Image (spheres, rainbow, N blue to C red):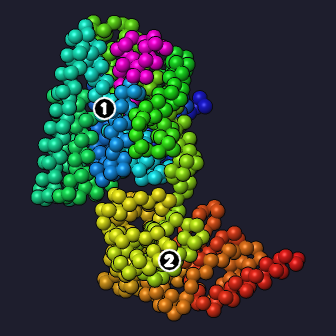
Amino acid sequence: MSFLIHDFTGISFGIYLTIILGLGILAQWSAWRFKLPSILLLLAFGFGAQLLFSISINDFLTEELGNTLLLPVVGLSVALILFEGGLTLKFSELKESGAPVFRLCTIGVLIAFTLTTAIGMYLFHWDWRVATILGSILVVTGPTVIAPLIRHIKPSRKVGSIVKWEGIVVDPIGAIMAVLMFQAAIAGDWDSARAAIIESLIKTVIVGLVFAFILAKAIEFALKKHYIPDFLHSVFIISMIAIAYTASNAVVHESGLLTVTVMGIALANQKSVSVKHILEFKEHLRVLIISLLFLVLSGRVETEKLTTEVLEQGLILLALLILVVRPLTIFGANLFTKKTTFKEQVFLASLAPRGIVAAAVTSIFALELSQAASEGKVTQEVAQQAESLVMLTFIVIVGTVAFYGLLAAPLANRLGLASKNPRGVLFAGANIWCRQLAKALHDDGHDVLMLDTNYANIAAASMDGIPAKRANILSEYVEEELDLTGIGQLLAGTNNDEVNSLAAREFTHIFGSAEIWQVAPMDDNAHHTNAVASHQRGRIPFTGRPNRKELESRVLNGGIIKSTTISEQFTYEDFSKGTPDHIILFLNSDERGLRPAEEDLKKVSAGVTIYTLVPCETATEITKKIEINKLKNTQS
């Protein structure tokens, strides 16, 4: 291993950034590939880079440069993340989750702060200044860890909204509380501390809300009047975030996070202009920022000191946060209310990972306390205790991400609050062939949901016992209010090819492009000057690439959906020979779950169930052949 360390010693800053970027993307890909929490792998890669290659951001920054350059960059990066989180918060989500979110962000924060501070003061014997600052910081969860976990767990809409709102809203609250406790710490006597807290709180709230409202309205006005060209929208927003964060902090210390969060929420809920394209860009930027920040900050932690000085204390704190503080916070905040069920509270009590905001804010205030000690505002004992805050916080981050990341998904499945691997199908369109297909899938226990604006189609689907709603697939209602629990893919099959194409584009960011399917349009074989571009469509399903009119014609002429399980005795070749005029629509297997058949399907393995559109008389023949093969197999 020494040759690796030697090779990476004395590298340039550019090479270091390249290595960090490569490791960050590798960690993100590995997390996706092996279905693990991405933050956990990022931290592991960050510590590993330091241990194996002896590379760290500290090698390129003096202590003074680190404080003056790195921390502002970290702060602005966190501001971008919180703004992007604010853009995902819609007030429509609060119809079900509003009361629980309010309780968690008020009563819950107070309980968590009190318990964590008490642990620091009475169990670890910290100075109250250090204990209250750490108590403030550890009330946060954060979008950097919550968002990937929600994507991984896919909980019910209500629980997902509660977790998302709490994670994003509590972050600036925790940062503001830390500022208030720091002001109290350097104020001296209690009267001065109380006055400093009240004054700082009022200023922070006023400045944060006023700046956020003014700048959000300015952005909305500029976009509405088209004063900003489309290609500058994203960079314009980034610059406005930087202005909001920096200007707000200049007026009131650490009020910038509140400003950018509220600004994001305000833009998300205005109706004048669409900000979806900005949100998509910000999501990509967030992945990059998180990848770099976690690797850089975890690389700054001296692992030797962490294991020898604060490991035992950190593990005790971690255990108490998971087993005592979080459960008491959830159950205490939801006491005497029926807005959340017991199962939902159990799940919420088992999901409170800490992320980059906790790491960044802890780093900032550890330095602030050290600076205050050098100026004689606090004692050297406080400064020494403050030095351990960053390492303790990283223990909490690693521990909570690992624990909750591995526990939350199985627990949500066990409680019935999420689907283990949601493979249900959202049908855009409820015409006759769609209804037959949806009924066959639904009768076999698969989750389906049909959407159509035609009342007759929805009524017919409901009469067949198929879950259906009269709604436009392109409406805000579908994306923002419809509960898609158990649904993991879209099949666009309306009678309008353009609507199908738009639906495919709109739902890509929800299900992912691999799970977006669109029935072959009527212009499928047209010249490229007349056909819709292929990148504007979803994936074309079903063997033979039939369009909607072909499918509808077959059903009207007596075609039915037949499910057949391929086996060693009755192979796909046997099925194909005896069923020349068939279209395979869906496949289902234990390994890959339910999925539409690809147009160029050539082989189906044993154990896979196929859903096929066949003439009525052919279905009868298939049934006879299967029974004959079963009988032969039994006799042999």
Badge 1 marks a residue whose secondary structure is: helix
Task: List x then y, in percent, for residue 288.
Answer: 38, 45
Give the residue type that dot 1 points to.
Ile
Identify which residue is drawn at 21% across, 17% down. 196
Q: Earlier in the sequence, mark 2 or mark 1?
A: 1
Q: Nearer the viewer, residue 354 or 22?
A: 354
Q: Is residue 463 visible?
A: yes
SS majority, magenta: helix
The residue positioned farthest toward the right in the image shown: 636
The answer to whether 69 is drawn above or below residue 148 in the figure is above
Does 125 lie within the magenta span? Answer: yes
The percent coordinates of residue 627 (x first, y second) are 76, 82
Residue at (30, 34) in percent of width and height: 172
Q: Are marks 2 and 1 in contact (CB under 8 Å)?
A: no
Q: Residue at x 43, y 13 (%)?
A: 121
Q: In screen coordinates, is 2 left or right of 553?
A: right
Q: Amino acid at mark 2?
A: Asp
Q: Mark 1 highlights which residue?
A: 173
Magenta segment: 114-140
Q: Nearer the viewer, residue 561 or 98?
A: 98
Residue 464 tag number = 2
Q: Which mark is residue 190?
A: none
Q: Residues within 10 Å of mark 2 (few under 14, many from 20)?
A: few
Residue 10 in view of the camera: no
Cα distance between the residues tagged 2 and 1:
50 Å
